[in-house]
Image: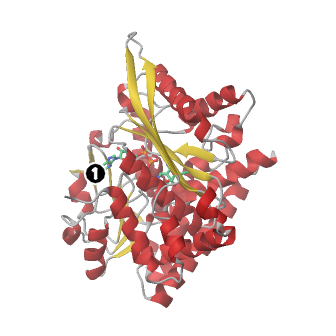
Amino acid sequence: MSESLFEQASQRLADAIAHVDVSADVIERLKSPKASLQVSIPVRMDDGTLKVFQGYRVRYNDLRGPTKGGIRFHPNVNMDEVTSLAFWMTFKCAAVNLPFGGAKGGVAVDPKQLSKFELERLSRGYINAIADFMGADVDIPAPDVQTNQTIMGWMVDEYSNIQRRLCPAAITGKPIAMGGSLGRETATGLGAFFAIETLMPLLGMHREQTTVAVQGFGNVGSAIADLLSKAGYRVVAVSDSKGGIYALQGLDVPSIIQYKNSTRTFQAVYCQDTLCNIVDHQRITNEELLKLDVDFLIPAALENQITESNAYDIRAKYIFEIANGPVTPAADAILEKRGIVVVPDILVNAGGVTVSYFEWVQNRSGLYWTLEEVNDRLKHSMIAETLSIWKIADRKQTSMRTAAYIHALTRLSEAIEAKGTRAYFVQ
Ligand SMILES: NC(=O)C1=CN([C@@H]2O[C@H](COP(=O)(O)OP(=O)(O)OC[C@H]3O[C@@H](n4cnc5c(N)ncnc54)[C@H](O)[C@@H]3O)[C@@H](O)[C@H]2O)C=CC1
Ligand SMILES: O=C(O)CCC(=O)C(=O)O
């Protein structure tokens, strides 16, 4: 029987344990989620019928602070996936030193099949169902795959209605007009850009000579492709769920973004997949994109894209994981043997949750920052944590992934030990 996604995720912890002096109690504490909730969400459809959707929220661990993590709308969402994503959030928040634990949520739905009003009713219904499980000091949702500012706006409004007071700090990634932070929408891409730029001199790479392929052209994939191409990297391929495009001389990324935006039929809510309609470049499949001979491969779509079945075909020199969990542990082992360096998700994509933290701080203090302040703080944090993880990998002679887990585990262990034995009985 094949391993579940959560079994694969847990393997990362097992790999790191060998390198850190943590007590058996700490390991035991991190093996399973604190709480998992599955809810049925009844939604009145536009044609008058009633449909019930399955929703999930997992609070994995809150020993470093309230739990934090996005909400995903996708047909394949299930408890195993949400638990894995919540596990990764726990280690991500610790890896970049945010005072948060990890959580994740989702609804099994194809949002592109819903009208805008149906989507709003589903979003509000989800919050209604999990309202007792969340809150600014408890669990703070945010956007993830196929959710965005507009949806977070509906959700925070619903939560505030239930509480009968404004609760902006209960959800991040909101519209600016509702207390959202400047810079949150581009933060995941920008954080990844800072991590890459920090590593460039250490890897002996130069922007103009670096070719890049990006899988996934949503919020984060389009942002990183844009940032890298504007900085002089040669972005030669991008793709979305319908397929990709390739041009050896480099793609005109801003034009692709403009094209994609102008052809979205439902612009304010989510992107439609449109890359396949661009005809000026060679069309490739997603499988072909992953196997391109490039310097940097950036998976920015979904988990389990690079597995033992295609790891031998990967020709990129470095993989920067912006998606959560795009490389399986079995693929990791093959890539490592082949000398391909993987820079892990819990570092590379931490920019989003970092600016979510800034949004939560701004909501709680009532003092709002300029875009420059947000981006400067993000840059400072991404550079510092990237260098720390690089140094751990060098000192302990481990992969960057194991180093990131060692870094996070050390902080989690300190929090668990600091709480004393009560943590084992009352959490
Ligand atoms: N939105 C955020 O702030 C953060 C997102 N992430 C992760 O980044 C990844 C992407 O998230 P978003 O950009 O927010 O989602 P999104 O919904 O905006 O975009 C997802 C993109 O992936 C494409 N896609 C889906 N399946 C694909 C496939 N098999 N091959 C190629 N492309 C495919 C879609 O067409 C779309 O372009 C996810 O793994 C998410 O968990 C991580 C940290 C924060
Ligand atoms: O912004 C956040 O709180 C969470 C972002 C997220 O879901 C992720 O980093 O995977």
* Residue 41 x %, y %: 45, 27
Q: Is residue 306 left or right of residue 142?
A: left
Residue 272 visible within the image:
yes
Tell me the residue that label 1 is attached to. 245
* Residue 164 x %, y %: 73, 26
In what quadrant of the picture does the N terminus appear? bottom left
Residue 231 visible within the image:
no
Residue occupying the point 56% across, 54% down:
352
Tally the marks.
1
Q: Which residue is situated farthest in the front direction here? A: 425
Residue occupying the point 59% across, 63% down:
424
**Color encoding of the figure:** secondary structure
Camera-side residue of 43 and 58: 58
Which amino acid is tagged 1? Ile
Vertical order, 157 against 344 (above or below): above
In what quadrant of the picture does the C terminus appear? bottom right
Vertical order, 122 against 194 (above or below): above
Vertical order, 341 against 226 (above or below): below
Residue occupying the point 37% across, 33% down:
109
Q: Residues within 10 Å of mark 1 (few under 14, many from 20)?
A: many
* Residue 255 x %, y %: 42, 46
Camera-side residue of 190 and 53: 53
Residue occupying the point 42% across, 46% down:
218
Residue 277, image quadrant: top left
* Residue 372 x %, y %: 71, 57
Q: Secondary structure at mark 1?
A: strand
Residue 166, image quadrant: top right
Residue 42, image quadrant: top left
Q: Is residue 311 left or right of residue 252?
A: left
